Image: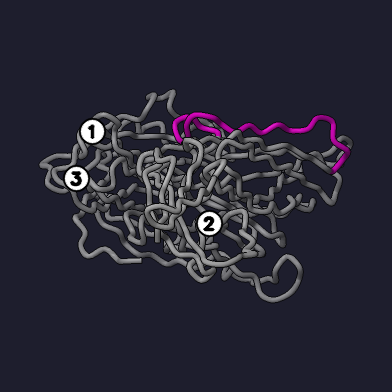
Amino acid sequence: MKPFSSLLVLVIAFLLTGTRANATHVRAGEITAKRIPGSSLLTYEIKFTGYYNMDDDGKDAAILNTDVWFWITGEREGIKTPRVGGLDGMIDVGNETTRNEYVLIYTFPAPGVYTINLGIDNRNADILNIGPQPTDRLNFFIRSTLAINASLGMNRTPVLLNSPIDQGAIGQRFIHNPGAFDADGDSLSYRLFTPLGATTDGKTPIPFDYRHPNTVPPLGPKEDGTGQADFKIDPITGDLIWDAPSVAGMYNVAFIVEEWRDGSKIGEIVRDMQIRIRDAPNARPKLAIPPDLCVEAGTTARYTVTATDPDGDNLRLTSTGGVYQSSLVDPQLASFQVGQSPPPGTASAVFTWQTGCLHVRNEPYEVTFKVEDSPRPGYPNPSLYRKLVDMVTLKITVYAPAPKNLKATAVENPTRAFNLSWDPYTCQLPGAQIVVYRKEGCSDLQLDQCQTGLADNAGYTVVARLPANATSYVDNG
């Protein structure tokens, strides 16, 4: 992995009105970007997705933020950008929160690596792990980095499909997965990031007091009672795990989703998110951990999801992933069918995806499954019930099929050789190759289902790389 050798900085900032101090109470958000199909290499859609709190009367803290100003390095003035949908664009996503999107179509001046910054006045109040208090006097800051290069083609940042507003319970393991999906098939990695504030003009990040949520006293043990609580993110899956909360309240944390191609970093997204912890009289449900799947393009990926609840509560299963969205995969989409009338405290569903040649890529697809409990019939004091969740991620690798009906015919004249032939290849994708290997003697090599090609240490050597439309090769080596 190579670090960036240079960065050309693009700064995006909010320039709000004189009422801005009372207009926003932002909980979470991130910036994404994608090139506009059919447009110039330099023309992109830049989107800020912000999550704002609603008060006890249902009033949205974002109601006055119908417009924002993106300030870009080199521009003399800010670019006024309306919220998508205007007032109707404030989408209630539960947990006293609305989602708001602000989209700018922008043409960059030249190829390069751009960092996009965004600052907003006023986080919401009573966040326990940042300071100084009151936290509604502290500002919000995020950034994303985007590489623009002709060799990258339709490069775009990953999209985060799961909401950054989540909740957990005292003494019970908390897990969040952003549901990151990269439509370009780039590799993703994850690391924690320290949440930041911003200057009043929104241009520049400002550090403030921050501590990981597991260090807010009084400290407690993990869910199983062993050891001190910890807080971490899996660098490969993106699972953000807090095992386990000990103090009720609101917390803000942040992490970075890094994007890699051919061993080089080409971009990153910062997500600043909010977690609300409550004391819950019920225990969280649990999902069975799915095995990774490897499927040959043209076959069906299928997995049965199962969940149980120790209290026998009602369960609701849902699933997110790019494989469900036509804007992210093409052409066949996956389905998720939940079973009907399960026994108390259980739930099951079937994930099905008919794969095709266009789904072949090096990086696996990720599908997130989520189970949420709710009071069973006759539950005492339902107003005290706190819905709890569990999440797991299924990785699906779609590999290209092997050539079919391979035949080898000896050719004696003019030199000893073998003529190899096979049926026309079914997945003739741009840049695809048929690789021919040779090994002298017998072999009892057993290939892993996920493995494509043959390792050199198995005694095989590459003798030819052919275009995908080839149907024969003469080996006279």
Q: Could you say whether the residue bearing mark 2 is in a helix, strand or loop?
A: loop
Q: Which residue is mark 2?
A: 238
Quarter of the C terminus within the rendering: bottom left
Question: Does the magenta stretch mainly form a helix, a strand or a loop?
Answer: loop
Q: Which label's residue is closer to the chain start, 2 or 1?
A: 1
Q: Which residue is mark 1?
A: 80
Compared across the picture, whether 397 is left or right of 46 comes to right
**Quadrant housing residue 345:** top right
Residue found at x 31% / y 48%? 118
Residue found at x 79% / y 40%? 347
Q: Is residue 135 visible?
A: no
Compared across the picture, whether 104 is left or right of 32 comes to left
* Amino acid type shown at disc 2: Gly
Estimate the spatial distance between the alpha carbons at disc 3 and disc 2, rounded to whole Å: 30 Å
Compared across the picture, whether 401 is left or right of 170 comes to left
Residue found at x 40% / y 54%? 270
Which of 187/389 is in front? 187
Q: Which label's residue is closer to the chain start, 3 or 2?
A: 3
| Rendered location of residue 87, percent (x, y) | 41, 25
Q: Could you say whether the residue bearing mark 3 is in a helix, strand or loop?
A: loop
Label 3 vs label 1, nearer the camera: 3
Label 3 vs label 2, nearer the camera: 2
Mark 3 vs 1: CB contact within 8 A? no
Residue found at x 66% / y 74%? 228
Q: Which label's residue is closer to the chain start, 3 or 1?
A: 3
Give the crowd class for mark 3: few <14, some 14-19, many >=20 residues within 10 Å: many
| Segment tinted magenta in the rendering | 324-345
**Quadrant housing residue 340:** top right
Estimate the spatial distance between the alpha carbons at disc 2 and disc 1, rounded to whole Å: 34 Å
